[in-house]
Amino acid sequence: MGFVHFVNFCVMRSFYIFVSAIVFTTILSPALGQVPIDTFESKRILSDTLMARRMLNESNDFMAAQKFDLALLKLDSARQIYFRTIGQNNLLYAEVLNQEGLSFFNKQRIEESYVKFKESTLIREQNLNSEHLDLAASYHNLGNSLAIKGETDLAINYLYKALNIREQSKEVSNVDIAKTYSGLGNCFRNKSDYDLSISFHEKALELLIPVLGPNHQNIAKTYGNISTCYTGKGNFSRALDYNQRALNIFSETKDFKNPFYPFLLNQVGIIFREKGEYQKSIEYIYSMSSGLRKLTAEFPRPEN
């Protein structure tokens, strides 16, 4: 039995070394750049970097659950490990920065998200070819943060960079392309170029509806954005039409806690106000708000 145990130990030890070598060469080595492997304490780097990778994966789960504070804690730990083991100028470090940027963006801490996106983009520009989809993601995220900061022209520049990469790729999803269309649509709306904005939002719809279905919240948001453009153009009948399409989606899905739903209600009031129908605006918003209060009372209040 002692000999059998010894053989089993040797087999398992060999298997561990083999798997570790594969993980190192396929996952870690690309991020380490051209630095020779014999300059590192390979076992420590392997262990620490895999721990950081696990934290990064856990942060993605927290982000999916909209627990952004917990995600940021995991990301901060992962970033410190990468900084200590493989340095800043590598793609793993850039991935953490990008995820931190997304977490800050979702918490509406836009300036902090912009800083993270900017740093991540610079690293990816140095380490990826100009057509890489991760670089397109960085350009897209950076453009969105700049748009909210009010730097619309610079945002458009980065969003076009993202779009050029995504439209030429055979691997990108239509949803990602549609997101960039929507980002550009919002930017041109902010510049009062309503026709170009509508064009981009309609392109987004063409890609989103076959993938997400006609009743997805992102379809409703796109309808709402188009409605805003028609309001700016003074075409109030079209504005009401698209706004009603969006409201119908939330009515059918009963997604009345969605933060975009009150925006749509407010938009109706703006449209009637612009038409000069002030009493109708007040009556409509009041009736819709009353219905909203009644319907949301059926749902538990969100936890703080």
Image: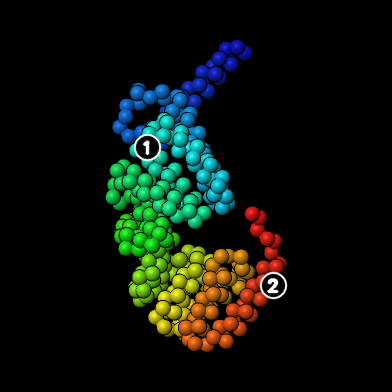
* Left or right, residue 264 beside residue 114: right
Q: In which quarter of the image is the C terminus?
A: bottom right
* Residue 294 tag number: 2
- Which element type, helix, strand or loop, lies under badge 1? loop
Name the residue that disc number 1 marks. 88
Is any atom of residue 82 visible in this view? yes
What residue is rendered at 56% in x and 65% in y? 259
Which quarter of the figure has residue 85?
A: top left
What kind of residue is marked 2? Lys
Tell me if mark 2 has few (under 14), some (14-19) or many (20+) residues whose alpha carbon lies within 10 angstroms of its own.
few
> How far across and how far down the image is residue 134, in percent?
37, 49
In this rendering, the answer to whether 9 lies above or below 192 is above
Between 14 and 47, the one nearer to me in the picture: 47
> Seen in the image, is 175 located left or right of residue 303?
left
Is residue 170 shown to the viewer in this render?
no
In the displayed structure, 237 sits above or below 129; it is below
User: Which residue is at 37% across, 37% downward?
Assistant: 88
Amino acid type, mark 1: Gln
- Measured as percent of width and height from the top left, residue 295 is found at 67, 71
Q: Which residue is drawn at the image coordinates 54% and 67% (left, top)? A: 260
| Mark 1 or 2, nearer chain start | 1
Q: Please report contact status of discs 1 and 2: CB closer than 8 Å, yes or no.
A: no
The residues bearing labels 1 and 2 have C-alpha atoms spaced at a distance of 52 Å
Q: Quadrant of the N terminus?
A: top right
Q: Nearer the viewer, residue 142 or 221?
A: 142
Q: Residue at x 53, y 45 (%)?
A: 71
